[in-house]
Image (cartoon, rainbow, N blue to C red):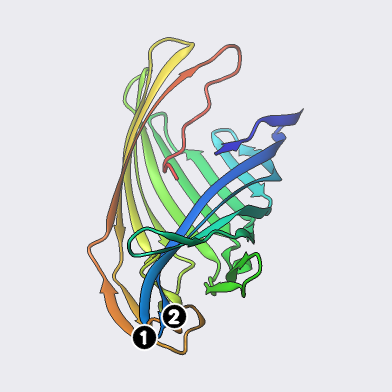
């Protein structure tokens, strides 16, 4: 999905600065049922497919404020994505009645991250991260089929935030154990939550380990469980994205996600980088 090589390294006594070039590929599909005619009443479906490649950049800095304590700062730029594809309109029996070329544009948000890592004893290290994502740049998605009126999905997202904290314990020279907890504020609000994306605030709980096989080879393992909070859906005919669908009042509950990650790292001449506490 994304290629992000690190370039332009510049080393100073207590500062490491780097930059990266991002390439982001999107292959999207959006579908929904439709009322295609009133006399006689005709039902069908529309499916939009499109893809695009977007380009951006990343900047980062790692500051050693004192022995054993570092602060990391990162910035990832916005990505402009102009998708090209088609809209397939079909009847319930599968017969295609229209297939116009279609375009859609969206701006993926920029992101700022600040993190702290502090070794408070030979065995214990404290970790913390704050991340801001500029999701408020994405207020609506306009889908434009050739020769037809545009279809507008009203999102009205707000900025997203992610706060995490954790501990790492150096069991012995080869094995490090870590655990943490995080809280993420969703960009989706109650007023604009839909069945298509019933997102809500969530709590992350994570545990993992690193095992150094030798001075060059190491293995990482992490498990994360995400508890999504209950969210309500209140859509009516006055909502632009729900004008022909009536009223929907619902509640999203008991949602969760499990993430398992396994990694292998081989070091040539630089010190082994510490893995992320949370895998996103």
Q: Residue at x 60, y 62 (%)?
A: 134
Instruction: Name the residue that disc number 1 marks.
Output: 246
Secondary structure under the numbered disc 2 in the rendered image? helix
Q: Up-down: is 84 above or below 171?
A: below
Q: Residue furthest left?
A: 254
Quick one: 74 or 33, which is closer to the camera?
33
Quick one: 191 or 59, which is closer to the camera?
191
Q: Please state the horizontal and vertical placement of residue 131, each as a whole percent of the image.
A: 54, 55
Which corner quadrant of the image does residue 96 belong to? bottom left
On the question of residue 195 being in view, the answer is yes
Q: Please state the horizontal and vertical placement of residue 94, each as a whole percent of the image.
A: 36, 58
On the question of residue 200 being in view, the answer is no
Q: Up-down: is 184 above or below 278?
A: below
Which corner quadrant of the image does residue 138 belong to? bottom right
Tell me the distance, in whole angstroms, between the alpha carbons under discs 1 and 2: 7 Å
Q: Up-down: is 95 above or below 176?
A: below
Which corner quadrant of the image does residue 82 belong to? bottom right
Count residues near mark 1 (Cα–Cα under 10 Å), then give few for <14, some for 14-19, many for 20+. few
Q: Please state the horizontal and vertical placement of residue 9, each as a whole percent of the image.
A: 74, 29
C-beta proximity under 8 Å, tags 1 and 2: yes
Quick one: 256 or 60, which is closer to the camera?
256
**In which quadrant is the C terminus drawn?**
top left
Taking 128 as reference, is 140 left or right?
Answer: right
**In which quadrant is the N terminus drawn?**
top right
Count residues near mark 2 (Cα–Cα under 10 Å), then give few for <14, some for 14-19, many for 20+. some
Secondary structure under the numbered disc 1 in the rendered image? loop
Instruction: Name the residue that disc number 2 marks.
Output: 242
Q: Residue at x 33, y 65 (%)?
A: 92
Q: Residue at x 38, y 68 (%)?
A: 44
Q: Which mark is residue 230?
A: none
**Number of residue marks:** 2
């Amino acid at each position: 999905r994304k290629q992000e090589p690190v370039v332009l390294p510049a080393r100073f006594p207590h500062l490491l600065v780097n930059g990266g070039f991002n390439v982001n590929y999107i292959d999207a599909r959006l579908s929904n049922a439709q009322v295609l005619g009133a006399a006689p009443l005709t039902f069908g479906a529309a499916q939009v497919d499109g893809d695009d490649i977007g380009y951006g950049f990343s900047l980062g800095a790692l500051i050693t404020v004192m022995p054993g304590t570092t602060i990391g700062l990162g910035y990832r730029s916005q990505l402009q994505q102009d998708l090209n594809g088609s809209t397939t309109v079909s009847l319930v029996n599968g017969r295609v009645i229209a297939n116009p070329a279609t375009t859609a544009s969206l701006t993926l948000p920029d992101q700022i991250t600040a993190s702290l890592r502090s070794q408070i004893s030979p065995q214990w290290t404290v970790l913390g991260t704050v991340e801001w994502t500029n999701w408020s740049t994405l207020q609506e998605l306009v889908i434009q089929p050739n020769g037809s009126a545009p279809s507008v999905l009203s999102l009205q997202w707000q900025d997203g935030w992610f706060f995490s904290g954790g501990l790492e314990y150096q069991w012995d020279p080869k094995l490090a154990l870590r655990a943490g907890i995080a809280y993420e504020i969703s960009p989706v609000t109650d007023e604009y939550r839909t069945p298509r994306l019933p997102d809500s605030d969530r709590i992350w709980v994570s545990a993992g380990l690193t095992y150094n096989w030798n001075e060059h080879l190491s293995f990482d393992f992490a498990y994360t469980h995400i508890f999504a909070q209950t969210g309500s859906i209140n859509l009516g005919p006055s909502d632009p994205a729900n004008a022909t669908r009536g009223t929907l009042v619902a509640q999203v509950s008991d949602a969760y996600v499990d993430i398992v990650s396994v990694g292998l790292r081989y070091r040539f001449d630089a010190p082994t980088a510490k893995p992320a506490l949370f895998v996103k």
